[in-house]
Amino acid sequence: MNTVNLKQLAKELNLSVSTVSRALRDSWEISTPTKQRVFDLAKKMNFQPNPYASSLRKHRSRTIAVVIPEVANNFFALAIKGIETIAREKGYHVLIYLTNEDCGEEVSVAANLQSGRVDGVILSLSEQTRDVRHLLELQQRNVPLVFFDRVCDSIEAPKVVTNDYESGFVATEHLIKAGCRRIAHLTISMDLSISHKRMKGYTDGLLRYDLPFDEEMVIHCEDDEESIYRKIRALLSSEKRPDGIFASVEKLAVQVYHVCRELGLDIPKDVKVLGFSNLVTASLLNPALTTISQPAYEMGKEAATILFRRLEKKYIVVPDDRVILPARLEVRSSTI
């Protein structure tokens, strides 16, 4: 049986090869009637595309990179799963790069990815990242870039985030309604947009319920694990010990549990604890942890979908398009 190729389809349809190729990829540049003509004839002639040859012609690696700051956070594990779901559907491989919250590592990874090793990048910033020239250089090399969760507002690129401000407000409001009057906020780098938004939700929550803002109740946990532990221990050992804690990231909520156990503090009797977390074991902790759970898997899928739209040029991707997916409050024993 003779194999039908693009040239034969184009000749039969009296169209250019490039038009037929774009139509078969469902490109937004080709009209619906033309696409239908191409699809119908391709089916009739039993046309079978050759993805390997297509990859060679376009110099595609059929690989995308996912750059994340840490793996201990269950959020990123779920996001990667969502990304890989879409990548597999598209016949792509996924390379995972870990920066360990180190901007230097992020710069090194970005430089490595400029070589054409991957067709596109999905990235979440490290907490140390302030200068983003390495990411601008990546864009200048025409490497499509999509941010998720920890995004850079100064770079025009699609972004997939959750409703951090509203979630911060809801978390604070929940602790207040649970009876807390001295609520501590544990946060990471204030250079990250998620930290600003969650912090703003926290302060506006206090304001809404006429509770005073106390700078001593805001603990910046940007250092190593040992330093974070000491800061949380000092907070919970102080005379002004909070009766509620809102941890902005998963690892900080877990540290609070460790410190409370060592100090003999009862959760939730002595201190109520709430954290941003996607831990599957949150309900199994003693007591079960109340969480703001982000749609991590869905965020990964959405980020990958946007990246592949750019790679396939199916739709016009707005440079600074922002998709916001809502998080949800999961009330458990740590705040009841």
Image (cartoon, rainbow, N blue to C red):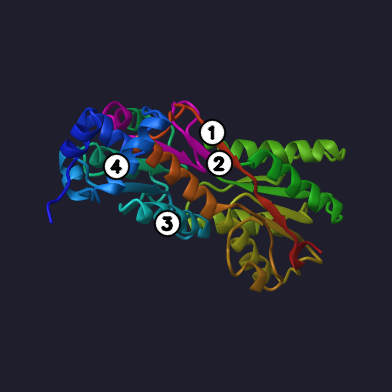
Distance, label 3 to label 2, CA atoms, is: 19 Å
Determine which quarter of the picture holds residue 145. Answer: top left
x and y, in percent, of residue 141 in the image: 26, 29
Q: Amino acid at mark 3?
A: Thr
Q: Residue furthest left?
A: 2
Q: Amino acid at mark 1?
A: Arg
Q: Nearer the viewer, residue 101 or 14?
A: 14
Q: Is 335 a magenta residue?
A: no
Distance, label 2 to label 4, CA atoms, is: 42 Å
Label 1 element class: strand
- Magenta span: 137-160
Against 97, is 331 above or below?
below
Sequence-first disc among 2 and 4: 4
x and y, in percent, of residue 64 in the image: 31, 47
Q: Which residue is mark 2?
A: 161
Identify which residue is drawn at 42% across, 46% down.
Answer: 304
Confirm whether residue 74 shows in the render. yes
x and y, in percent, of residue 55 in the image: 20, 44
The C terminus appears in which quarter of the rendering? Answer: bottom right
Tell me: 224 left or right of 29. Answer: right
Q: Are marks 1 and 2 in contact (CB under 8 Å)?
A: yes
* Neighbourhood count class around disc 3 (C-alpha, 10 Å): few under 14, some 14–19, many 20 upward: some
**Front disc: 3 or 2:** 3
Against 236, is 190 above or below?
above
Q: Amino acid at mark 2?
A: Val
Q: Which residue is mark 4?
A: 41
